[in-house]
Image (cartoon, rainbow, N blue to C red):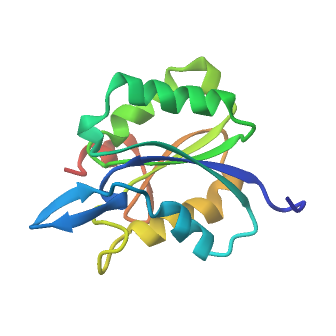
Amino acid sequence: MSASSILIHVFLTGGTIDSITKRGAVVPRKRSIIPEYVRSLGSSNTFKFSHVCMKDSRDLKPADRATRVSGIEKSDATHFIITHGTYRLLGTKRELAKNPSLRGKVIVLVGAMTPLKSKNSDGPANIARAISEIAGLQHGIYLLVGNQFLSDNAAMSLH
């Protein structure tokens, strides 16, 4: 890593951002396209990718959540991006905020209203913004959808 780059650990959990549209329904992909997309951006940061699951956030199980938390706890990184479905974005933020072992870290939960590869998706801008701004964020947990960092109140009105 160069002096100006940081290690960003990306946890992949599916959600609309990493899905396809099939017969009018949004269906999580079997394999994430996020790593390929991130690499295409040409960022000077170093990235590590961890596959947790590929699910609608409403289908996340306690084991998925535990895998995500233990992965963050064991990581050498202090900056994290978690791709996530928008339905449970706020719940995940609140759950992570209760965990004292995650204090001192910067975590950006990134969702999208349409799949990354869809025309007019907010996914590409959300990922790019998370990567470009994460180094300047204070320790904490952030929500990013619609190319905006959202307050908890704004996140409650996503669906």
| The image quarter in which residue 5 lies | bottom right
Image x and y of residue 28, in percent: 28, 54
Looking at the picture, tell me which residue is in the foreground, 126 or 25: 25
Image x and y of residue 93, in percent: 44, 35
Considering every residue shown, the one lying at the far front of the view is 30
| The image quarter in which residue 22 lies | bottom left
Residue 96 appearing in the image = yes
| Residue in the picture at 74% in, 62% down | 45
| Residue in the picture at 32% in, 27% down | 61
Reply above or below: 95 against 75: above
Reply above or below: 108 against 121: above
Instruction: Give the left or right position of residue 64, taking residue 97 as reference.
Output: left
Q: Quadrant of the N terminus?
A: bottom right
| Residue in the picture at 24% in, 38% down | 58
Reply above or below: 141 against 22: above
Image x and y of residue 11, in percent: 53, 45
Reply above or below: 133 against 152: below
Image x and y of residue 128, in percent: 55, 68
| Residue in the picture at 40% in, 24% down | 63
